[in-house]
Every structure is written in C-alpha cells, then in structure tokens.
Image: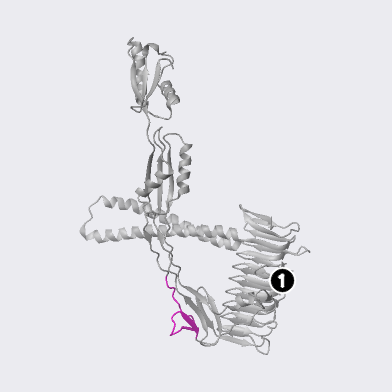
Amino acid sequence: MRGVYLNYDSSANQLKLVIRPQEVDVKELNEAALVSHVRKTYGQLYLFEDQIKAACKAAINAQKLQQYNPIEEVAGEPRDSSVRFSVASDKLSATLEYQVGFGGKSYELSDLMDLATQAGIKRGLSRKRLEDVLQRVKTSKAGTEIKDVVAKGLPAKNGRSSKLIPLVPNALDRILRPQSISLSRVDMRDLGEIVCVKPGTELVERRPPGKGRPGYTVTGEVLEPREGEWLPLKPGDGTYVCPHNENLLRAEIAGMPKFQDEKMWVDDVFMSRGVNVGSGNINYDGAVVVNGDVSEKMRIIATGDITINGFVESAHLESGGDIIITQGAMGKHDEDSDTEYSGKLIAQGNVHIQHGQGLDIQCNGNVTVGKQLAYSRIRCGGDVIVGPLENPNGNLFACEIQCEGIVHSGSLGAVSGSHLFVDFSAGLNAILERIDSVDELKKLLRDHIQRHSKKMEQFRDRQIPADLQHRMTELVGRYRDERTMFQQVLVTLEHLNKSKTRYLNDIGLKAMKQLYPGVVVKLNNRTWKADREYSTGHVHYVGHQWQYDPIL
C-alpha cells in the first residue's frame, strides 16, 4: 500500500506504523483496507485497530490540508499466551483455559505441569490431555481460547447394602434347571425333587454390607466412602430369626419355602398322591403338592404354590403363587363354538408346564413350557418361553397370546399355516393410561401453582394483620406443598415415559428355528403378519412399526 510503512522495533517490542500523506493514494486508503494490510503483514501480533484507524483518518485529513508531516502510531505488539487452571467446586475435576498468544511466549508441557502443581492440582492430572491441548494450540489462530478438562478425581464408591441370600431354592427355580450329573453335564430328565423343609432349616443368610472404596480429589484430599446399609431381615410366615445369629433366618414349620421380593416365608404344604373323584377337590390355605395325576373336572385352589408331579387333564388350578406341572396338561376347546377351555391354569405368579394343549392360562408372571404348547390361550404379565431357558427350542403354534414381554421359542407357527396370534396392546395401554392421568394431574397442578403464585405476589406487597399471620403461614406452606407435589409428578411422568420406551424395546417374537406363515403380532393398530416362512429371526417394534430381522 503506497505511503504506508511498517517496521517492527525489537528493542521496544512494538510494531510502528508510519504514513506519509504526500505518497498516499486517497482512493486506495481507507480504515478497513489499512487494517487488512497490517493484519496481512503482521497478523501474528496483537493489533491496535483503533490506533490504526486513527492514523488513517489523520493521513486523509493531512492530505486534504496539504500537511505532509509523517504520521506515526504504534500499530501492534506481541502478547504472550495466558494459562489458567480452575478447580471445580466439588474438587473432582480441573479445567485448563489456554489463551493462544499473539507472537509472544507459548508454553511447553513441562510449563503446564508446573503451573498445575502451583494451582494445587496433585492427583488425576492427565499428561495426554495436556498434550492434546498443546497440539490444538499449534493449529489455532492467535487469540483463540481453548478450554478442556485436564484432571479428574475419583468419587468415593459407597458400599453396597447387605444382601439376602436364599439357602434353599424356590420350587420353580429348581424345576427350570436340570440337575447336574458332573461339572460338565446335566440330566435333562432329572428336574429335581420338590423342596420341603423341616423346622429349624436355614433359609436365608444376610451378608454384611460392603465397606465401599475411597476416592480422591484433584487437590489430593481423600474422599471417605459411606458404608452400605443393613437391609432388614424380616421373618415371613413360618420363619424366625435365629437367636444365636441375627443374620440367619430359619424355618419355624415344615413346609415349602418361597423367596420373593427380598422376603422368605414357608407355606404349609398339603400333599396328595393324586386328585380325582376319590380324593375330591382341594381348597387349601398354603402350598399344594400332588405326586400324581389330576383327573378331569377336578379343582385345586391354593394360596401358595401348586406343584403337580404328574399329568393334568381338563382340570381347574388356581394359585396365589406359581403353578408347576412337571409333566403335561391338556384340556378341550372347540374353536368353532363359544365353549370355555376345559383346562384352566390361573396364577398370581408364574406358570410352568412341560407340554400343553387346549389350555386357558392366566398369570401375572412368565409362562414357561418345556417342549410344546398348542391350541391354547395365554394372558400373562411377562414372557412366554417354550423350551430350555438357556436355548428355547420348543414349538408354539395355534395359540392366542396376550403378554407384556417377549415370546421366545424354537419354532413359531406351523407348516400348515395354523393361526398364532400375539397381542402386546394391553401392557402398553396400561402405561399410556397412567401417563395420561399423571399428565392431567400435572396440568391441573401447574394451573393451580400459577394462579396461587400471582396471589402470593399480591400478598407480599401488603401488610398482613397480626391476627391473620398464622393463616398466611399456612397458605405459604400449602403453596410449597403444591410445588413439591408438582416436582414429584414430573419425576413420575419421566419414569412412566422410560417404562413406555423400555416396554416397546422389550416386546417382540424370537424364533430360534423357524417362523411360519400365519403368525400375527399386534400392538394396537400396528400389525405384522408372516406371509412366508422365515428362518431364525426376531420380530421387534422399531420406529412405530414392526420389523423382522434375521438372527445371525
């Protein structure tokens, strides 16, 4: 640029700008052009743009007035990089703020390590993170601010709570897991004996809580962990706490033990060699064990588990716990008429049978079948699994199923194209109803809070008489209660939405061998139907629609 001279004075560490008005081309010289010219030549320095612009104006005015004395200004100077370490309020992290300098001093890794120590950072400093920051500095423009976490502490890990360990298995757990012959083999036919305990048998052991693991801050302070809590060892019906060991639960009566929801109890057991016309129906307050068959049209009702070591034919079983049938169960049902299923299994817990046909199964838990289930109706609150739990390889066909988990089997449907209908709508609709009701409550509370907030603002500007002061205190307390309830409703709504997402991720069909035509899966108005034979695959709900994917 004509008439403009730049000179860096190394003794003063300054960039000198000299403009000679008699040499300047007025058409070429303007503030923006002059700043751009200086930056292009000495962009690594910190430029004083105001002084550069002032010199430009002075040069233009001098030329107009025909005053040709040189105009001199300091246009810039080098500035060192700046570094600042800051420790978070919880002292579990430290951040480095690096301001890239303008041609001045920069920092090496050793400098940063020393500065971190001076800032009180003693532990958790990452050499690699510091090197990453310095690498970014090399490719960043002057004046850029780089900020990154370079040190991390370790939060203390609180000890886990005490744990209740059942010392005897539930009947269903024992049935579903074949007994070991050796370390590497199991006998698929030996499903284990039904466990009944005698008085004094050890049932549950309470393991002590963990001590936890100490942590540390970046400043070197030790964070002490909190020891885990002792869970209460509550004796259920038929049990007591050992007088010599408060962490041990023993059986008070002879019967069938049951461990569920961190609670152990022992049911009285009614044992029978079979249920038929000769023995009569059974209605018992406790568990029922039948070591034989259950004949047609017989009824067994029990508040505890029902275990049948035999075959069930067209009978009615109703349990307050689990129903376990170690062999098969069969009923009669005419699909062309409205007749009821002659074989009914109703349980508050889970239902397990070895194989079944013509059954009406209702339970709140899972339905597990050893080999095959056909021509039946299932309504359950969990999964339907046909075959061994580790590798479901059974057969499921010609059934109508309403469940809230996965349907997992070796083959789904049959070569003949028999109808297998699976509906997951009930579980989702129950969650949606709760979401709607909680959402309505949220809107109602929000309206109340907004209205009451305006009233509270009006009261704050007024003088409250002494005799009404207690009423004002009461109103403030209610207002705070409303806000607390509103926050609780928001948390509940968040949990329900997570439950909805989890439900949609969990439901589906899984066939380990074949999935045949005639299989229909439904979720409200979204339906998928198998129109051909599929190999090993998974039908799941993705993006508001059903999708089949092969299992590789």
Q: Residue furthest top?
A: 66
Residue 96 showing in the rendered view? no
Percent x, y for residue 356?
Answer: 70, 74
Q: Does 89 sit left or right of 207 as displayed? A: left
Query: Circle 1 — which element?
Result: strand
Q: Main secondary structure of the magenta part?
A: loop
- Residue closer to the observer: 350 or 145: 145
- Residue closer to the observer: 297 or 225: 225
Q: Quadrant of residue 90?
A: bottom left
Q: Say above or below: 196 vs 52.
A: below
Percent x, y for residue 550?
Answer: 70, 56
Residue 401 showing in the rendered view? yes
Q: Which residues are magenta?
A: 229-251
- Residue closer to the observer: 423 or 106: 106
Q: Which residue appears at 38% of the width and 53% of the height? A: 122
Q: Amino acid at mark 1?
A: Gln
Image quadrant containing the C terminus: bottom right
The stretch drawn in magenta includes residue 435? no
Q: Which residue appears at 43% of the width and 48% of the height? A: 149
Q: Which residue is mark 1?
A: 372
Percent x, y for residue 207?
Answer: 47, 75
Percent x, y for residue 5?
Answer: 40, 18
Q: Does 125 sit left or right of 382 as displayed? A: left
Q: Quadrant of residue 371?
A: bottom right
Q: Quadrant of residue 339?
A: bottom right
Q: Does 19 sit left or right of 188 as displayed? A: left
